Image (cartoon, rainbow, N blue to C red):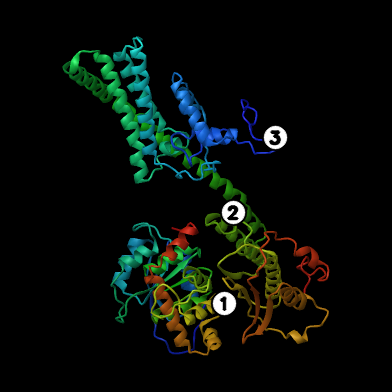
Amino acid sequence: MPTPYEPPSTTGPGEHRPVYRLTRPVQGRYLGGVCAGLAEHLGLDVRHVRLAFVLASFAGGAGVAAYLFLWALTPQSLAGTAVPGTHDVAPRRLDNESVRNLVVGLGLLVVGGALFAQQHGVDLRLGVLIPLLTVAGGAVLAWSQLDDAERGRWLTRDLGSAGRRVGWVRPGIGIALATVGVVVLATQGRGLAGLWDVGIAAVAVLAGAALIAAPWGVRLWGDLRAEQSQRIRETERADIAAHLHDSVLQTLALIQRKADDPAEVTRLARAQERELRGWLYAGPRGSQATLASAVMEVAHEVEDLHGLPIELVITGDGPLDVSGAALVRALREALLNAVRHGAAPVSAYVEVGSEGVQAFVRDHGPGFDLDAVPQDRFGVRESILGRMSRHGGSAALRRLEQGTEVFLSLPVTATPSQPDAQPDAQPEGQPEGQPEAQPENEGTR
Amino acid sequence: MPQPTSVQPAPIIRLVLVDDHRMFRSGVKAELDESMQIVGEAEDVDGAIVVVAQTRPDVVLLDVHLPGGNGNGGSDVISGSRGVKAESGEPVRFLALSVSDAAEDVIAVIRAGARGYVTKTINGNDLTSAIRRVADGDAVFSPRLAGFVLDAFGAAAGEVAVVDEELDRLSTREREVMRLIARGYQYKEVAKELFISIKTVETHVSSVLRKLQLSSRHELTAWAVGRRLL
């Protein structure tokens, strides 16, 4: 996003450099980050820019003026983007230190300029100028607290204890400076005693004003807070109401209509419970394409198809790569078999560990013999056993005293994982026929 | 979910039901067999503490989410009833029940001192055997809880304690037991699978429960925080 006043690029011809919007970086800055930001924007060495500003400052303070102007109008960059040529600079100065540098530097420049001017016979009316500058300095200091990124934090009071201290030191000093400036301006050469009197008077007036305004201010503040929290509560309430209306109320209506179909009612209730739980306890899990979220999705899908609850336990998580997606599809087939041919309770346990992924699907049905399954049935042999071995894993079937257990295992692969979850479906869909696309197809074993 | 180990003339277990839903309390009452005697009911934290102190039951069936107290639900009942002994002289034991198996509920109530955790979808048989197990001083782990434990102790990632007494990690055996429970095996199936006695399985589970209650393992917290639970 180039700014309209962007000057022609100074980098070599043919060399394409991404143009950065003019911002003030947080990292690698000494004062306000103006020079660093400008260097980044113009593609210049930050040292040259700084030197130019310093030199320009001696030309009647033009550099200082330009710096302040840019500082005030340039937004601070949110992300700490790396600034070319500043990697060797200390990452980030303490704010206090920057402020000190700024104050000392400005002070020296101003004093030097004033002495120079005075020597050449210009009457600067120092009695007025110095207090004015003090006031200005105080104002800058106080307002610098409201530096873009900090403004938000400051206003929302989301500060740590250390941050809170720093947050109030600057405005405090600023206000003190401004007050001193005002007092000095007001006492205009009447000596210390007069200053004292005026100071007392000023404090008295301020205290009186504060006393009068305090109840009003407190009430205003309180009202504002109350209104704010009220609005937040109302928004939350509206959100919850909207969600409940779209989910729970709809399901309840459906359940009433299907009251004579217990299986359907159970299925609806189960699906709704899961949805509600996901909404209430939504965590980082399930938000992106991870193995755990894929497994969860598949288990819920099978639950919905057959209305039989699956006790699913997942430990660990990892990115979903091609072989992981194969495991998930094999797991889906195993779950489908379990709910179709086995009996409740159906348990699934998926462990994503450092050595690989292991998955267990267990039902309490009568069990079956793999050798007795006809050769042309693809369910177990192809979708589970074959698929796992094609992807470098293994699968095994166990008959337990009560029920069957399918065991899927996938070692950690050295190949970089691809976040794409889909490619497995295409090449494998053909030889396996359609058993996966048609869950109603009984007897795919 | 564990089932009754064997048919034996078991002593009658005195039970207190704590749940803020009257419908659920009557449902549980209808499901339990005659070997359980319900001696008291309560519907909030403060009422529960009073009832437990008065009736001194063997087992308290405790809902995790309860009104009153310090706002921590079931955990407040457990801490408020500390030191209360059942009529048999054993400490009063708590079996937590909840509609949700969200980790924060599980971990909080177990660390408060509950001997087990089951969800309200449990059937009558399983609930009976779970209560009996807890009354005997053993622990009741649902598959989900076993999964939490494996996750929290880094056991799924392959961390194993060198010494059994180590609080921050599971021993190899404990890990095997937890994994089998997570796979939906009942205690007797776990015992058969590992060629150990049911009593040994119970010992391992109790030891895991102790670790879960006492471990200061920072991952336990970090893990919960990572899932926005604390």
Residue type beneath disc 2: Val
- Furthest-front residue in this view: A120
**Helix, strand, or loop for circle 1?**
loop
| Residue shown at 37% from the left, 19% from the top | A113
Q: Please identify, in this view, whether the residue under mark 3 or under mark 2 is nearer the observer.
A: 3
Q: Which chain is indicated by disc 2? A: A
Q: Which mark is residue B184?
A: 1
Q: From the image, which quarter does the C terminus of chain A lie in?
A: bottom right
**Structural crowding at the residue carrying mark 1, measured as other residues with C-alpha within 10 Å and reported as few (<14), some (14–19) or many (≥20):** many
Q: From the image, which quarter does the N terminus of chain A lie in?
A: top right
Q: Which chain is indicated by disc 1? A: B
Residue type beneath disc 3: Pro
Q: Is residue B81 above or below residue B180?
A: above
> Left of A211 or right of it: where is A77?
right
Q: Which mark is residue A248?
A: 2
Say yes or no: labels 3 and 1 on the same chain.
no
Q: Position of residue A144 (x, y in %)?
A: 41, 31
Residue type beneath disc 1: Gly
Q: Which mark is residue A375?
A: none
| Residue shown at 64% from the left, 35% from the top | A11
Q: Position of residue B172 (x, y in %)?
A: 48, 81
User: Would you identify the image quadrant in which residue A275 lies?
Assistant: bottom right
Q: Is residue B183 visible?
A: yes
**Helix, strand, or loop for circle 2?**
helix
**Structural crowding at the residue carrying mark 3, measured as other residues with C-alpha within 10 Å and reported as few (<14), some (14–19) or many (≥20):** few
Query: Which residue is tagged 3?
Result: A13
Q: Is residue A20 above or below residue A322?
A: above
